[in-house]
Image (spheres, rainbow, N blue to C red):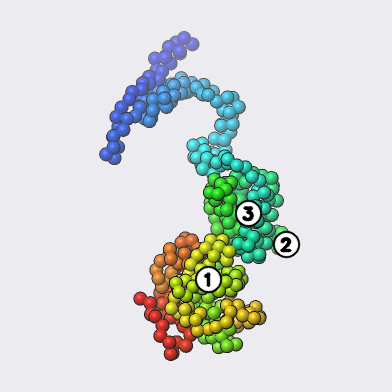
């Protein structure tokens, strides 16, 4: 035993530390390096930013080498036995996929301890109260449904700041179609995700800071219809406007022109705008969508271009005349118009004719990423240019041609 001990000592690790100046990519910086060999004579070189880290690693390495043939290791550590056991268990769970450092970085990015704690249920009530009068009643009902489902899934008394992207994704995967067996449709996933995004965005606003960041941002959106949107061919758009110009004296011309050439959302924004005709500002050539009108609760301005100006100025009457519901549904059915097809057509023609993701996003009330992903190249440029020349009485009117 003594001989074996002497032999081990003769081949024990010989490690030393020294401070050096290193050069990399033209920069000079100071560092600490550990030099030496292990008991097998293998060369060791390790670089550190500070002396403390170098000395700690050196001590641990020397003990590791001395105990390399033993079943257990004796390393210097400040952790308790229970903490070491927990760390080893976590390393075993992670396997080769992630490191402890990566897991820690992710945790601290997404789990910032909140200065103010609030339950999911209380935050939901506050949010829905803030949205009253800001977004349409139908949207409020949908938000209430989505948030009620979330409360049941996570527990209403759970702390809001503890909701993670992974938990929200599990919630969305738990949604079921009618019958309660098959997973919900992709559109249902996206609809619930949109509701949650709006909710957590409101909670993360600097006025509240109930959560450090919006966890929904890391939850994927499902691709539907191969990512394509329904867009009216230019010929169909022209036929639609020619028809409404004649239909019952043109009573719906201003409504359909606002939906098609301003991209204003039907079923909410257009109806609210009709109650505030002063927001159609001809003197400045803009339509002002106030926070109370906007579906998202954020204001925006839409340019009144030449053809839209002609539709709005040549036809009188209210934006929504008497008995408009029946008449609008009749026209939509006649031309087989989907709920958002006019808005989709506006966005597609806008970005292709004017060539700016930013300007299209501003006027549409969307993000640039949405414009790029769904509307860019959904219509060719020639059709987009022709779209903005659809005007009433084109034979006798002069329409500005776009460059």
**Disc nearer the start of the sequence (2/3):** 3
Image spot of residue 86 (x, y percent): 59, 31
Q: Residue at x 57, y 35 (%)?
A: 90
Q: Residues within 10 Å of mark 3 (few under 14, many from 20)?
A: some
| Closer-to-camera residue (6/396) | 396
Rendering quarter of residue 271: bottom right
Q: Residue at x 55, y 25 (%)?
A: 79
Locate residue 334 relative to residue 67 in the image: left or right.
Answer: right
- View extreme (right): residue: 179
Q: Residue at x 46, y 61 (%)?
A: 368
* Residue assigned mark 1: 279
SS assignment at label 1: helix
SS assignment at label 3: helix
| Closer-to-camera residue (396/66) | 396
Q: Which mark is residue 127?
A: 3
Locate residue 130 relative to residue 72 in the image: left or right.
Answer: right
| Closer-to-camera residue (306/332) | 306
Image spot of residue 53 (x, y percent): 42, 27
Asked whether residue 379 appears in the rendered view, the answer is no
Q: Residue at x 35, y 76 (%)?
A: 403
Rendering quarter of residue 32: top left
On screen, 215 above or below 140? Answer: above
SS assignment at label 2: loop
* Residue assigned mark 2: 179
Asked whether residue 125 appears in the rendered view, the answer is yes
- Give how far apart the Cα atoms at labels 2 and 1 are: 46 Å
- Give how far apart the Cα atoms at labels 3 and 1 are: 27 Å
């Amino acid at each position: 035993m003594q001989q074996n001990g002497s032999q081990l000592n003769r081949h024990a690790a010989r490690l030393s530390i020294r401070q050096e100046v290193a050069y990399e990519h033209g920069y000079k910086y100071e560092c600490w390096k550990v030099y030496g060999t292990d008991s097998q004579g293998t060369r060791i070189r390790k670089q550190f930013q500070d002396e403390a880290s170098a000395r700690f690693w050196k001590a641990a390495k020397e003990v590791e080498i001395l105990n390399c043939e033993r079943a257990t290791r004796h390393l210097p550590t400040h952790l308790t036995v229970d903490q070491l056991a927990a760390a080893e268990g976590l390393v075993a769970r992670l396997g080769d996929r992630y490191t402890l450092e990566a897991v820690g970085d992710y945790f601290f990015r997404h789990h910032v301890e909140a200065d103010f704690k609030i339950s999911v249920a209380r935050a939901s009530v506050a949010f829905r109260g803030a949205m009253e009068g800001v977004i349409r009643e139908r949207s409020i009902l949908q938000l209430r449904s989505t948030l009620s489902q979330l409360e049941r899934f996570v527990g209403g008394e759970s702390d809001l700041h503890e909701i993670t992207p992974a938990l929200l994704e599990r919630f969305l995967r738990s949604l079921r179609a009618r019958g309660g067996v098959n997973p919900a449709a992709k559109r249902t996933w996206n609809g619930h995700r949109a509701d949650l995004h709006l909710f957590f965005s409101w909670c993360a606003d600097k006025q509240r800071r109930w959560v450090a960041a919006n966890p929904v941002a890391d939850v994927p959106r499902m691709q539907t219809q191969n990512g394509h949107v329904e867009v009216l061919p230019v010929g169909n758009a022209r036929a639609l406007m020619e028809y409404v110009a004649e239909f019952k004296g043109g009573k719906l011309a201003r409504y359909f022109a606002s939906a098609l050439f301003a991209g204003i959302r039907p079923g909410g924004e257009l109806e609210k705008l009709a109650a505030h005709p002063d927001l159609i500002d001809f003197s400045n050539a803009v339509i002002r969508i106030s926070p109370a009108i906007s579906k998202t609760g954020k204001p925006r301005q839409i340019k009144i271009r030449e053809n839209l100006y002609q539709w709005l100025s040549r036809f009188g009457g209210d934006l929504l005349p008497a008995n408009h519901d029946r008449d609008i549904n009749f026209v939509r059915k006649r031309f087989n118009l989907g709920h958002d097809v006019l808005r989709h057509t506006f966005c597609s023609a806008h970005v292709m004719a004017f060539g700016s993701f930013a300007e299209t996003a501003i006027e549409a009330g969307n993000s640039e990423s949405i414009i790029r992903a769904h509307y860019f190249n959904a219509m060719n440029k020639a059709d987009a240019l022709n779209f903005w020349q659809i005007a009433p009485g084109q034979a006798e009117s002069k329409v500005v041609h776009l460059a």
